[in-house]
């Protein structure tokens, strides 16, 4: 498995690149450097992509994201800085070794698919293996396997011209998968596809990633796509990375006004998860406890409901105060009779959008559980509504943040694009 | 107003003399090489002419028609038979076959030289910067001018004609190849690079196949220019239809001029359609035509 580490990467286009680099390193601002007639495409970018992570680089066109990804496999040579793939600094090795690293470790998926039109689907999917020098039968077998993985079994002998856009990109994906490399660079891989197909491809990527655990760098200008796919997101603007964080961090704690304005349009209910808004469960009662103790606990916390969990915190259900009172009067020795087994538990990764249904069905707060069905928190309805309310206020507040009216900020047009895509 | 020999008010620079001197030096220095070139070109030309004229005309016509059928269509094959039979009927067969040989040899040499130069120009901006004005120069120079050094270097005969034709016909071959390779989708080239392909492999497996239809258009241009130049080459003694045309011109012989001219047109149509059909069979073009 592989990791990527970028340190102080610069890419400046133009004759006076070196001069511009020194200016930028001394802290000159963009305007000053532009006067030299150079284009600073990437400025001082540092980040680390962990093994098995989807790292999304998000920015509008011209923000330098495509240049950045092309430096990660040496298609562009950085003006300054280092790119480490595992322990090899690919900005510092000769072209022959660089080709070897690309063959062994790095696959790439392109915005416009970049298939060879005169080769069949299976030949295209096998192309990386052809370059690696693998024999025909073996590489066709591997390619056919990869095609099956992306749902294109049976299409081997077709030509790219016979495929729809989504299918072409599946071939592009299969080519990168078949190459056997651990790192996948995806340059606006789904941007040329229409929204429905794009959604489908995103789902497929998530599903494949769960199985294969590649180290993926994904470039996009679609914030919703970034939020959906990214384990972490790097926000880029004018060549600089302005923030790196999880979708929730970017949403809840934007580092700059630019990011804040950007994320203002995001549908939070489709990004935030139960875990991010849940509260600690206070009235938790052991499964073996009697009604009398339960009642005391609930009085202590002044709540109408209590959550019943086993010794290992496995969630069992909820009890209501009236029922507990009745049970106490009856002299029951356990809570089994009054335990509501249909009490609703939601997984910690459930999106806010999917919590409204369950919240309507039960008057008790929602229990949030982890993979082992252990109780990790609760979401009272009020909390859910409050989370929604803060989303709404942020949305209306956003234009007041510094840069509205600034031509370089995300304008109405781009905001409309995000709304139209991926939702 | 004189500066040494030069009179500013009645200027006369003997630039032509300088060119002649340089040219003389060139021919003297590379005499052996030039003789080798001459022998090779004449040899190829004679061989091809012998083959075309050894067999009876109807055998050659049938072969040309079969090629037309294989590459293009039965309608084109019929056209080939009729039109080449017309050449025979106009008593231009012998001269037409000489012209055909000249064109094929000259075009083959021009293509063999221009494609590598075009590739080089596509790979290197410096080289493109150097060769572009040279090509402009070659194309704007009146074609008859090429005959003078060709005559001087190779004497009267076929070789001078072929060399002049090659020089005249090469530029579109270089230009189209350069353009064709530069126009190949950068993303596809990047895909080759990203998966670790060497520049040579990228050229062979990506750039040339994708550029082929445009390169073929260049080759077509080369052949058409060769054909027009081969006629002029008769001025330095290259045989063929050009000789007939010049004779007709000298004697104001309209019928002979018309018949020789028509034979040139027939050759042009045949070669043009054949190359176009070959371009249409390029893998990229075929793959783009398949339907589900």
Image: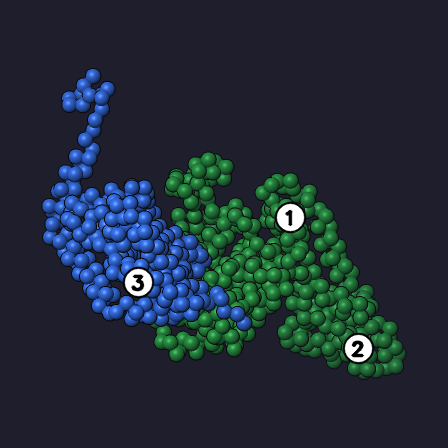
Chain colours: A green, B blue
- Residue A317 shown left or right of residue B94 in the figure: right
Q: Are marks 2 and 3 on the same chain?
A: no
In the foreground, A29 or A195: A195
Q: Quadrant of the N terminus of chain B?
A: top left
Residue found at x 55% / y 64%: A165
Residue found at x 38% / y 41%: A15
Location of residue B71 in the rendering, given as x and y in whole percent from the top left corner? 39, 68
Q: Which mark is residue B5?
A: none
| Residue identified by numbered label 2 | A340
Location of residue B52 in the rendering, given as x and y in whole percent from the top left corner? 25, 65
Q: Tell me, yes or no, whether the two marked residues, 2 and 3, touch with CB atoms within 8 Å.
A: no
Location of residue B166 in the rendering, given as x and y in whole percent from the top left corner? 26, 52
Distance, label 2 to label 3, CA atoms, is 104 Å
Q: Tell me, yes or no, whether the two marked residues, 2 and 1, touch with CB atoms within 8 Å.
A: no
| Residue identified by numbered label 1 | A413
Is label 1 or label 3 in front?
3
- Residue A318 shown left or right of residue B27 in the figure: right
Please rate how many residues cluster around mark 2, counting C-alpha atoms within 10 Å: few if below 14, some from 14 to 19, many from 20.
some
Query: Could you tell me if residue A183 is visible in this image?
Result: no
Is label 2 or label 1 in front?
1
Q: Which mark is residue B88?
A: 3
- Residue A289 shown left or right of residue A6 in the figure: right
């Amino acid at each position: 498995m592989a990791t990527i580490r970028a340190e102080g990467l610069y890419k400046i286009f133009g004759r006076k690149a070196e001069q511009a680099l020194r200016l930028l390193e001394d802290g000159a601002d963009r305007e000053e450097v532009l006067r030299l007639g150079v284009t600073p495409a990437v400025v001082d970018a540092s980040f680390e992509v962990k093994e098995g992570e989807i790292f999304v680089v998000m920015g509008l066109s011209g923000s330098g994201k495509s240049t950045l990804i092309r430096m990660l496999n040496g298609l562009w040579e950085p003006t300054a800085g280092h790119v480490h793939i595992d322990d090899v600094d690919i900005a510092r090795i000769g072209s022959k070794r660089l080709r070897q690293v690309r063959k062994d470790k790095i696959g790439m998926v392109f915005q416009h698919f970049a298939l060879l039109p005169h080769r069949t689907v299976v030949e295209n999917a096998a192309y990386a293996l052809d370059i690696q020098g693998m024999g025909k039968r073996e590489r066709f077998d591997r390619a056919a396997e990869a095609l099956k993985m992306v749902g294109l079994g049976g299409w081997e002998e077709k030509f790219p011209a016979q495929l729809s856009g989504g299918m072409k990109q599946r071939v592009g994906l299969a080519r990168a998968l078949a190459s056997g490399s651990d790192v996948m660079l995806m340059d606006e891989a789904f941007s040329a596809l229409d929204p429905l197909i794009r959604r489908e491809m995103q789902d497929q990527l998530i599903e494949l990633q769960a199985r294969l655990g590649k180290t993926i760098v994904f470039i996009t200008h679609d914030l919703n796509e970034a939020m959906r796919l990214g384990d972490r997101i790097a926000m880029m603007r004018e060549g600089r990375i302005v923030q790196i964080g999880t979708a929730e961090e970017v949403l809840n704690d934007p580092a700059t006004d630019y990011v804040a304005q950007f994320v203002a349009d995001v549908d939070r209910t489709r990004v935030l998860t139960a875990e991010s808004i849940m509260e600690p469960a206070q009235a938790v009662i052991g499964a073996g406890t009697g009604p009398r103790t339960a009642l005391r606990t609930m009085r202590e916390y002044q709540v109408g409901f209590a959550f019943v969990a086993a010794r290992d915190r496995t969630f069992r259900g909820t009890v209501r105060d009236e029922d507990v009172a009745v049970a106490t009067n009856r002299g029951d020795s356990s809570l089994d009779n009054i335990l509501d087994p249909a009490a609703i538990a939601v997984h910690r990764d459930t999106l806010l959008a999917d919590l409204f249904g369950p919240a309507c069905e039960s008057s008790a707060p929602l229990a949030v559980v982890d993979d082992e069905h252990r109780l990790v928190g609760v979401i009272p309805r009020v909390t859910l509504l409050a989370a929604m309310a803060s989303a709404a206020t942020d949305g209306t507040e956003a234009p007041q943040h510094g840069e509205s009216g600034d031509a370089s900020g995300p304008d109405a047009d781009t905001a409309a694009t995000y709304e139209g895509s991926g939702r | 107003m004189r500066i040494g020999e030069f009179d500013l008010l009645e200027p006369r620079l003997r630039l032509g003399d300088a060119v002649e001197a340089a040219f003389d030096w060139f021919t003297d220095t590379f005499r052996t090489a030039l003789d080798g070139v001459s022998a090779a070109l004449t040899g190829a030309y004679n061989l091809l002419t012998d083959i075309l004229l050894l067999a009876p005309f109807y055998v050659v016509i049938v072969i040309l028609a079969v090629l037309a059928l294989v590459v293009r269509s039965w309608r084109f094959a019929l056209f080939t038979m009729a039109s080449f039979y017309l050449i025979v009927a106009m008593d231009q067969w012998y001269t037409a076959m000489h012209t055909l040989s000249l064109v094929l040899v000259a075009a083959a040499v021009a293509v063999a030289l221009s494609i590598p130069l075009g590739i080089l120009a596509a790979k290197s901006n410096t080289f493109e910067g150097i060769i572009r004005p040279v090509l402009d120069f070659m194309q704007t120079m009146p074609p008859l001018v090429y005959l003078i050094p060709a005559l001087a270097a190779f004497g009267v005969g076929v070789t001078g004609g072929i060399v002049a034709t090659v020089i005249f016909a090469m530029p579109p071959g270089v230009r189209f190849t350069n353009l064709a390779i530069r126009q190949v989708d950068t993303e596809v080239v990047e895909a080759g690079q990203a998966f670790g392909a060497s520049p040579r492999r990228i050229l062979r497996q990506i750039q040339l196949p994708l550029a082929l239809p445009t390169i073929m258009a260049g080759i077509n241009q080369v052949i058409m220019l060769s054909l027009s130049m081969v006629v002029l080459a008769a001025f330095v003694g290259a045989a063929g239809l050009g000789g007939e045309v010049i004779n007709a011109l000298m004697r104001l012989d309209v019928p002979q001029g018309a018949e020789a001219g028509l034979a040139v047109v027939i050759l042009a149509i045949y070669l043009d359609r054949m190359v176009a059909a070959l371009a249409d069979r390029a893998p990229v073009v075929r793959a783009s035509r398949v339907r589900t």
